[in-house]
Amino acid sequence: MSKYYLTTPIYYPNARPHVGSAYTTIVCDVIARYRRMCGDEVAFLTGTDEHGEKLQRAAAAAGESPGDFVAAKRELFKKLWRDLNISEYKFVHTSQNPDHVRSVQWMLRQANKNGYIEKKEYEGRYCVDDERYISDGAEPANCDICGRPAELISEQNYFFKLSAFQERLLRLYEERPEFVRPDFRLNEVKSFVKSGLRDISVSRRRIKWGIPWPDDPEQVFYVWYDALTSYMTGIGFQSEDPARQAEFQKFWPADLHMIGKDILRFHAVYWPAFLMAAEMPLPKMVFAHGWIYYEADKMSKSKGNVVYPEPIVDALDSFGAPGNDALRYYLLREAPFGQDTSFSYDALIQRFNSDLANDLGNLVSRTVAMLHQFSAGSVPPAVSLKNQQGTIQLITAYQEAFERFDFSSALSFVWGLISEANKLIVQAKPWELAKSASAADQDKLRETLYITAQFLRVISVLLCPVMPISAKWIWKQLGQTRDLEDERIDDSLKFKFLEPATKVGKAEPIFPRLDKEATLAKLYELAEADMEQDKPKEASKPVQIGKPTDSSPTPSTESRVSTPESRVSTPESRAATPDSRIPTPAPSQISIEDFAKVDMRVGEVVSAEPVANATKLLKLMVDIGAEVRQVVAGVAEYYQPEQLVGMKVVLVTNLQPRKLRGVESNGMVVAASVGPEGRPVLATFKEDVPKGAKLK
Ligand code: MSP
């Protein structure tokens, strides 16, 4: 039996977990279940990352102490993991945890002893949201993760000599390319490291909510140094309990850190360097998966487009469909693992109906019903399975796909087995064979029934890691009494056959076909009720998650300028579509720093063309000196494309990209909104101004 230790990232407990956070945990649960069924002894770690300025601020905003705040939020994660049927895991939390304080301080002392820590003055730009230094010096800079302007800070703190590890890291990537997966992420990491590594500050003076720096009460640890070390604390490192210490000895190093693409650098560059500095063994693999977007947009609470798992599960459950399994199946099957994917209710229902209700559901109900009808409710005598080659190949292909975390393909191989079984039934027509008196036909009938049931046996084993509830249900209908999770997914599966004469269970439909309209209605209803309950009382009305956006473009800064009828009424959109007849309330005052967050540049329109199926939108290419930006502007009713070409306009360049009618917009052209209908009049210049000039 070999050991397998895998981790999810530890989550920031500043907000309730959404489908994006659930994604990594579900994927890890699928891997943990798979490895257990391969016979491995598995340790599966998840947890919460509770220190740092972001949490300190969130707690203050909630009027709570950081300790109370994170302890309460931590429970939301544990509850969701229960609701999502996440199998046995260990949970680590980083605050109020003496083992963890010992682990982090131990790592530091080792690095210090080995000469990798020094104290010096730092001045730089720091992103509070992502808790990372963005650049040295006072020059303004934006965070390259969230795009927001970084704050200028200066402090005496301790530095980790990351630069000393450049060569060793490059050697690691050469010698063990599986250290970073998928391959294209390894290339990203390599070029980042090749471009040169700067030493990083690993302590903070400004933050109080953190692990104390040994021998310097003024400083706490940088949250990432603390967070990454939790992968060791979580399996017993520095525990005072000898049994937990033994656990650490058994399970470290981790076999897999599963993470989202946004935190790759921390895991593939900083973490191995911290471990090398402390002379600790390195994890075997860091796998960075893609992100789940909502209609190609980043989920964000402020945009009201966050998808939560609970209402989805509840909505599907209310139709008698196993919601939990269906969500897991959809997330793993829909997109090649590693790539980004867009969440859509339509696609979820479509997958459910075609793959689960149609293909799998039909196979199960037909097979069990036929065993009752034509074989007295039991498995017929075994037949010699001559043509096993196809099945064996599909099982092998599934195993290989699973080993490289290609879940979508692994599942497609299971669907290969399902389609083989369905084809066999259609071709052999057991209902006709049953009517025949010939001995050959009776043999053929028994053979067909046996092989079909045997297919189902294999299918339930292979589906168990992804859809444990449904797989167990099929297993039970096949009359199996052993715990399905005790079955092995290894070569023995290819030669394990159903025991003849086993009494099969009652035929029960497991995947009822979903009516699209009724299911969508339920999904919206529960998602909205859920968000309503979740949002602070003064917050705006949420976007109706998943509702088709066919009638009007997704609300965006651009559409707000010229589409006052925008169906989503948020305080923001109301403020952006002023009606000159109604006195506008004085806008609230902002600081000069707030204003400086908006990056506005002079741009020249180099081309303009209508957007298909949108009467109000034009696609503009705007040259802002350093680059040409594509933006979508809601001005088509008032400007001809040729009027705009050559015009100097004002472009807001640091808005998050949005898609309008499927066309990406990377900025906003500034316009006055004139008259009751909000006619857009583009801002321009009387004098000739160079492209790219900044507006201040
Ligand atoms: N606390 C750090 C991780 C420290 S690990 C030592 C952190 N936390 S997080 O809560 O912001 O993110 C946790 C994980 O959720 C990350 O892997 C991130 O990529 C993932 N996701 C957050 N939103 C996501 C989607 N919309 N889609 C997929 N994964 C996403 O980063």
Image (spheres, rainbow, N blue to C red):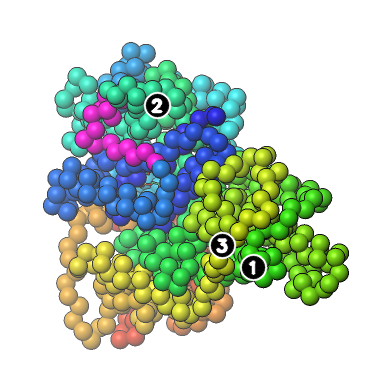
- Which range is magenta? 89-103
- At label 1, which amino acid type do we have? His
Residue 195 at least partly seen: no
Residue 395 at x, y = what percent?
A: 68, 47
Cα gap from disc 3 to disc 2, whole angstroms = 41 Å
Residue highlighted by disc 3: 505
- At label 2, which amino acid type do we have? Glu
Magenta-colored stretch includes residue 9: no
Q: Nearer the viewer, mark 3 or mark 2?
A: 3
Locate residue 367: give its quadrant: bottom right
Locate residue 231: give its quadrant: top left
- Residue at position x 46%, y 70% in the image: 320
Answer above or below: position of 468 versus 135.
below
Residue 215 as seen in the image, left or right of residue 666: left
Answer above or below: position of 668 versus 35.
below
Q: Secondary structure at mark 1?
A: helix
Q: Secondary structure at mark 3?
A: loop
Quadrant holding the C terminus: bottom left
- Discs 3, 1 touching: Cβ within 8 Å: no
Magenta-colored stretch includes residue 92: yes
Q: Nearer the viewer, mark 2 or mark 1?
A: 1
Cα gap from disc 3 to disc 1, whole angstroms = 9 Å
Residue 247 has which mark? Answer: 2
Residue 366 at x, y = what percent?
A: 65, 69
